[in-house]
Amino acid sequence: MADPVISFVIERTGDLLIQKIVFLKGVRRQVERLKDDLVRMRCFLKDADQRQDEEATIRNWVSEIRAAAYDAEDIIEIFASKVELFTKDKGLVTKLTYYPLKIVNRYKMGKEIESLQMRLNDMEKSRDKYGIKNLGVGTITHGEELQRVRRLVEDKDIVGFEEKTISLVAELLKEDKNRRVVSIVGMGGAGKTTLAKKVYNHAEVRTRFDCRAWVCVSSSYNHKETLRTIIKQLNPITNELLDMLEKMQEQDLEERLRQDLQDKRYLVVLDDVWKEVAWDCLAGAFPDVNASSRLLLTSRNREVAVHADALSKPEELKTLGEKDSWQLFLRKALVHGDNAGCPRDLEKVGREIVRRCAGLPLAITVVGGLLLGKKELKSEWEKVLNNFSTHLSRGQSGVSAILELSYADLPANLKFCFLYLGLFPEDSVISVRKLIHLWVAEGIMQKGDAENLEEAAAYDDVERLCSRNMVQVAEMTVDKRIKSCRVHDLLRELAVRKAKDENFFQIHDTRDDQISAKSRYLAVHSLPLDKNYFRSSTPSLRSLLFFNIRENISLSFKSFRKLRILDLENVKMGYNLPKEIGEVRLLRYLNLRGTYIRRLPLSVGCLRNLQTLDIRTISVDPVKLSNFIWKLESLRHLYAYNMECDVPLKIEGLRNLQTLSRISYHDIMQNNMITLTSLQKPMILVDDKSDIDKLCMHLSEVGSLKTLRLYYSPLPQSLGGLSKLHHVTELRLSGLFLRKLPPDFPPNLSRLSLKFTGLRDDPMPVLEKLGQLSILKIKDDVYGGLYGEPQQVMIISRHGFHQLKFLELSRLFHVHEIKVEEGALPQLQCLRIRGCFYLKKLPEELKDISTLDTLELVDMREDFISGLDADLVSSVPNLRIFDLPKERMQ
């Protein structure tokens, strides 16, 4: 992994020379020489990278180069940030103070560069001693020439599980009043979780149980967190509930779960249970009250399954047979899947690759993803087979060899991205938006032209990893973009092992783990026994991320001079962010989501490199801040639930700002919007005094604007001026109590969401005429919600919505009938109906819409489901009937 870190750092050093040249006068030549030394070292990294798996001395040499590259970047950025701060705030510092400080800092930087160059000289001597050869610099390509295959939807490539699905569904539906545990066991990568999901979402299973929940237990079992996860799926999520769960002890949580499940027929999936003790801890919280409740358990260990229920025979997943293995391989390795079979010249080598996978679905899937990114040439496939044999010759098992081979085949930047995912806890569902912000803040994304920002490059890398099956898609948006992802535990083990071998990052996941003072990237999954450890013991840290830490911690920000990433999500740390945060001047990402922070100090304005600031706290009070946001000149994303400033919030001049959530109408109207040249997604809070027409005139000056969200007004609103927003393609209106739709809409609108708008009349006659609308979501008593009875009818007229591809009707409690006239919705691909409890039936005309591929019925009454028209059901290729966990029902 020599190339990804070192090469990117070297390139960033060059970028810094250009960006900070005005601040590096007097030391520029030294910096250029340092960069040249690092570039020269990079010529030897190819040979070192090929040999470091076998030789510890080579691995250590690469680690030393990496440390030197990081130190070079730190030296330049720290010096430039100091000089830049003095230069821009010279009104506060007299010239008599400024120039001596500048000379001292320049002298100090020169000495640090000299010391670093001496280290590099020593490394050159070691390089000669180890016989490391110059194989050239090579190229660092950010974008692979991949065939961009977007088969990333929920996995339909389940092969060989048909009979087991039928058997497991039958076990869950058995007429046995006792609470029983049904288990799936098999080795890692055998498909246990995939099969459990298929069973969990089965239509008969969904309608059988009063409530359902799913929790990943994993090897690092956390009893409190597991209980909280289940409880949150059984209850509507409120701040009061979250606060209460945080304060509860284990016994209280167990009792709360028992109460939630008492007298109900429930199904709870316990995925990936490693040890018997985990079951023993949980068992008492699941009541057995003769209600035919079931627990579905997956485990690698058969003894765990037998221990949980000795009377229930575990369903053992064996490896796939030759036929099923070949079918799965073709679906994953070829662009056209298995529809046209395998090209004749590839079949022999392909079958040999499949044979080496020994029937393990994960191995077949991953090697298929590897081949999918290559040309369908015999020479390419033979090269993969030969490399596979090389890994096997090192004594690795078949699946380990496949995973190692797939990792080795990743381009440099994707190796970095894949290893970075190892920082997240096992079985994590990872937000792609958050991941993108982190990667961009790490500086590993190469910035293209204005149409291809770093964020777009980061998303492409997520997609590439998913295409290679190194990462799994957890959830997708309605327009088929990846919303969240996860990493299979075997692949995560590979990432953690590789990162450890190469000293890339460290994970603190037990109380007595020792944290290295040399750590650059640190993920904290469990606090050290000494909670004050982070006050002074980690001076080299660049990234510090906390996961599932709900205890009080003490941080000394003065010791974090090199920190770029600080993720404190859900951490307890008092109501006020310490003013010392302003000392962390290289900080690019600050996440305070889920904390109790109520005030940001004025010193946050010193964080001129900050790109992402997330202050979506769980405090009921707004986050108070001084008027410093305008100083954060690098800021790209500002997230807040509610923020309050003594004076109108100044944001003008933030040319990098893309996301702004949530800002009040009265604040935004005080700013010159034309200076926000990158703004794409503002969320604006309006009230009865807001002039929407004037606001639209204000926003029409922002050419980059793509999405507009208007939220929460206590009184009925009238919306005017939306037609001025020519650049807006997405509009979300929520809680505005409109009573009637606005007279016009943005002319290029393709996505519209209405929520809590309290319309008196059916909105369809107006909306169906929006010529470019492709996605429409209507939620939460939009129609008749404030004034009507549950006798409302929605009518989509002939030829209405001629471009619409996705329609969601959610929690429309007053709608009892939907009429679709002949010729309406000619392009509709997906219809989702959720929680419309008074809806009697689906319109029969849906079966005449030839483009309709997916029908999702979520949280609908049982008599509605049982009364579905058989012809309609058979006409839709994908029918999905399920309940959403309560925490998702928002």
Image (cartoon, rainbow, N blue to C red):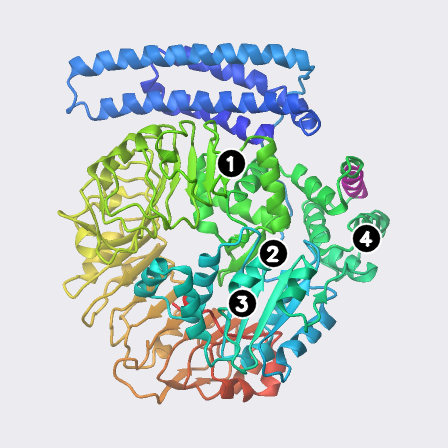
Check whether the beta carbons of the residues at disc 1 and disc 4 lie within 8 A of each other.
no
SS for dot 2? loop
Which disc number belongs to residue 275? 2
**Residue 433: image location, x then y, percent:** 44, 50
Mark toward the start of the polypeptide (3 vs 2): 2
SS for dot 3? helix
SS for dot 1? strand
| CA neighbours of label 2 inside 10 A, class few (<14), some (14 to 19), many (20+) | many
Pointer 1 residue: 506
Q: Amino acid at mark 2?
A: Lys
Check whether the beta carbons of the residues at disc 3 and disc 2 lie within 8 A of each other.
no
Depth check: give the residue in front, 143 or 582.
582
Give the answer, above or below, for where 786 lies relative to 634: below
Question: Which segment is the magenta one?
Answer: 378-389
In whole angstroms, how far apart are the C-alphas of marks 4 and 2? 46 Å
Report the mark closest to the observer, 3 or 1: 3
Q: Amino acid at mark 4?
A: Pro
Decide whether the magenta segment is chiefly helix, strand or loop: helix
Mark toward the start of the polypeptide (1 vs 4): 4
In whole angstroms, how far apart are the C-alphas of marks 1 and 2? 25 Å
Image quadrant where one finds the C terminus: bottom left
Which disc number belongs to residue 343? 4
Pointer 3 residue: 283
| CA neighbours of label 3 inside 10 A, class few (<14), some (14 to 19), many (20+) | few
- Say whether residue 324 is left or right of residue 111: right
Magenta stretch encompasses residue 413: no
Report the mark closest to the observer, 1 or 2: 2
Q: Please say whether residue 250 is visible from this viewpoint.
A: yes
In whole angstroms, how far apart are the C-alphas of marks 3 and 2? 13 Å
Q: Amino acid at mark 3?
A: Ala
Report the mark closest to the observer, 4 or 2: 2
